[in-house]
Amino acid sequence: MLTLIKLWSEFQRVVKRVIMKLFLLVLGTMTLCRANGNSIPCYDDLSRPQRCVPEFENAAFNLSVEATNTCGEYRDTQYCSGQCYNCQSGSHPARYLTDFHSEEGMTRWQSETMYEDIQYPNSVNLTIHLGKSFEITYIRLQFYSPRPESFAIFKRTCQDCPWIPYQYYSGSCDSTYNLPDSEYVSYNDPTMALCTSRFSDLSPLTGGTIAFSTLQNRPGAWSFDNNAVLQDWVTATDILVMLTRLNTFGDEVFEERKVLRSYFYAITDFSIGGRCKCNGHASQCVEAPNDPYNRLVCQCEHNTAGPDCGECLPLYNDRKWTRATAGNANECMRCNCNSHADRCFFDEELYNRTGSGGHCMECRNDTSGVSCEHCRDNYFRTSPDARCQPCNCDQTGSLNQQCDSSGRCQCKVGVGGEGCNQCLPNYYDFGEDGCRP
Ligand SMILES: [Ca+2]
């Protein structure tokens, strides 16, 4: 019986270990590879349009990170962790934040130490430019050093836009960031940035992780599809991590060189989980053609266009551009311009009146009208398929320049002839008042 119990518990241990290994494997591939989670195609098996999304990926993978401070960057410096080591240029560069590394050979970025004066109120910033807007699910940092006493994550949505705080982590929320220590998001302000003290302990001394989930505990997240405020909230083109204050044992007050050199920021991995933002109208993002900055663009479907598929193609504005939802692809609809125009704009008033909002622009072939459906002023045609021709009504002999559908002009009294250009028989004195009998 005893052997049976032993065997059973051994079996359980093996199963647990296998499950853990599998879990780590999945997690590893998710964070380390840029391409992984499934994309959804923009058309179903019957070629009907449906909401589509690019694959879920680590958007930070292999991207360069701008660090305002890196150990050894300008001259060799020392850091101590048990014994002391040299850091020289290239020892712990910022690219090690987003590189591919194995569990055994973890590479890390590292800052200068407190000896070089990086402690609060000085801060160290890490910035990643994603190259286009992404919808961010999480931002994760894996520390080699203890997690900071205070740091913050910001995002912005364009190159010149202001930085918007996502989350503060601090053992001193009140004094460092002037915020309450809270994990509660108010219904009235679903995009407020919180400050939490939960992840700011000195322990673990190494290997601590912090993951910020953009939608966790956010009111309205369950109806994300219809929540424009939260859709904006998860959107970012750049991410900034501001390392504000180092965690210490308090022994730095003695200003002993070796102690000061034992305090620094070091991060092994900086991941950003999310999808390239295409508003439900693309299943792939690709490098923009001929772009010197290697920026990405969506490969737009559903007759949409723009880097984020945020507008309709020029001839597809018959209804207002709308983001795709789970229930509706909201594809852009072609305007009816009778083949006489390549562009149209969405005319809300026209849409409300007729259910079709496409207002054609720059009608060709002397046509005019919201659908280029009739001839422009002072032109005529004999049938809807015929070409529009000029009326050529005589300036002097015609009441106006517009002719009827057979090209007949309206002549003044006593006037006749082609385009009202002469007096009728038995009339004379062709002039501004017509002809006299
Ligand atoms: Ca690394």
Image (spheres, grey):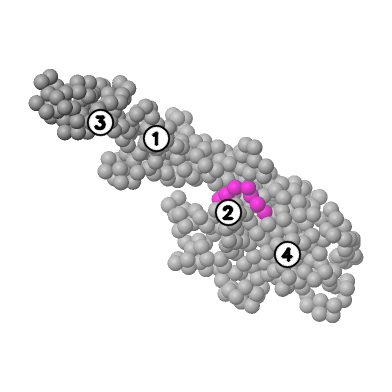
**Which one is closest to the eye, mark 4 or mark 1?**
1
Looking at the image, do the residues carrying marks 3 and 1 touch, with CB atoms under 8 Å apart? no
C-alpha separation, residue under disc 4 versus residue under disc 2: 22 Å
In the rendered view, does 386 fall on the left or right side of 345? Answer: left
Q: Name the residue furthest front.
A: 429
In the rendered view, does 396 fall on the left or right side of 413? Answer: right
Tag 4 secondary structure: strand
User: Who's the residue at 88% across and 71% down the image?
Assistant: 258
Q: Earlier in the sequence, mark 4 or mark 1?
A: 4
Q: Quadrant of the C terminus?
A: top left
Mark 2 neighbour density, 10 Å: few (under 14) some (14–19) many (20 or more): some
User: Who's the residue at 18% across and 27% down the image?
Assistant: 430
Judge whether 272 appears above or below 196 on screen: above
Which amino acid does the dot numbered 4 rest on? Val
Q: Earlier in the sequence, mark 4 or mark 3?
A: 4
- The x, y position of residue 68, in whole percent, is 74, 61
Q: Which residue is mark 1?
A: 362
Q: Name the residue furthest bottom.
A: 254
Q: Which residue is mark 3?
A: 395
Q: Which residue is mark 4?
A: 124
Judge whether 3 appears above or below 184 on screen: above
Q: Which residue is mark 2?
A: 158
Tag 3 secondary structure: loop
Q: In the rendered structure, which segment of residues is drawn in magenta?
A: 128-135
Looking at the image, do the residues carrying marks 3 and 2 touch, with CB atoms under 8 Å apart? no
